[in-house]
Amino acid sequence: MFDILMYLFENYIHNESEVFVEQNELTKELLRAGFNQEEIYKALDWLEQLADLQHSDEHPYLNAKPERSIRVFAEQECEMLDIECRSFLMFVERVGVIDSSTREMVIDRVFALEKPAICLDDLKWVILMVLFNVPGKEQAYAQMEDLIFDEPNGVLH
């Protein structure tokens, strides 16, 4: 499913192509590209659920804006997100790329990927996808893009 999300993101969103493609046409294109139909439906559902999270009363933590809070990860979250991923998530929150609501959306979407664990590169892409879908986060999206594409090579002193 993650490969399909990446394909969609790179071919439609990141390249600023037409984003509003009819679902049937999109499904046909993804089938022609060699993706499995069941996985296509899961990926489209993942995107739909991401859009729904923005307007959901089901997740009250998404609307909470605690000024001073500490995020304690549950055991299941620690299994899914290794220390590198958790540290990066806290880093992007601390520097203002994401806020607590966006962080929770990212964690929700990571778990929806149905993977046993996620690597840092995949986490970065999930953050980027979430930021793209949250209105008013254009600057944060640009900052996250910089973190993904402008990574320095070599050792920083």
Image: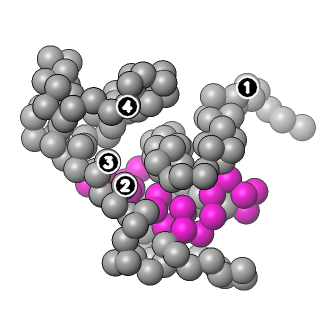
Q: What is the C-alpha distance between the residues marked 4 and 3?
A: 12 Å
Q: In the rendered view, does 71 fall on the left or right side of 97?
A: left
N-terminal label among 1 and 3: 3
Q: Nearer the viewer, residue 70 or 61?
A: 61
Q: What is the C-alpha distance between the residues marked 4 and 2?
A: 14 Å
Residue 74: % across, % down: 45, 77
N-terminal label among 1 and 4: 4
On residue 51, which mark appears?
2
Q: Name the residue beneath numbered marker 1.
A: 153
- Please report the residue visible at 59 percent of the width from the left and 69 percent of the height from the top: 100
On residue 19, which mark appears?
4
Q: In which quarter of the view is residue 70 placed? A: bottom right
Q: What is the C-alpha distance between the residues marked 1 and 4?
A: 33 Å
- Whether label 2 touches label 1, CB < 8 Å: no
Mark 2: few/some/many CA within 10 Å (<14, 14-19, 20+): some
Q: What is the C-alpha distance between the residues marked 3 and 2?
A: 6 Å
Q: Considering only vertical position in the picture, is 40 above or below 116?
A: above
Q: In which quarter of the view is residue 29 placed? A: top left
Label 4: element kind: loop
The magenta segment is 94-120
Q: Name the residue beneath numbered marker 3.
A: 47
Label 2: element kind: helix
Q: Amino acid at mark 1?
A: Asn
Mark 4, mark 3: which one is toward the viewer? 4
Mark 3: few/some/many CA within 10 Å (<14, 14-19, 20+): some
- Please report the residue visible at 48 percent of the width from the left and 24 percent of the height from the top: 16
Q: Nearer the viewer, residue 95 or 51?
A: 51
Q: What is the C-alpha distance between the residues marked 1 and 3?
A: 33 Å
- Whether label 3 touches label 2, CB < 8 Å: yes
N-terminal label among 2 and 1: 2
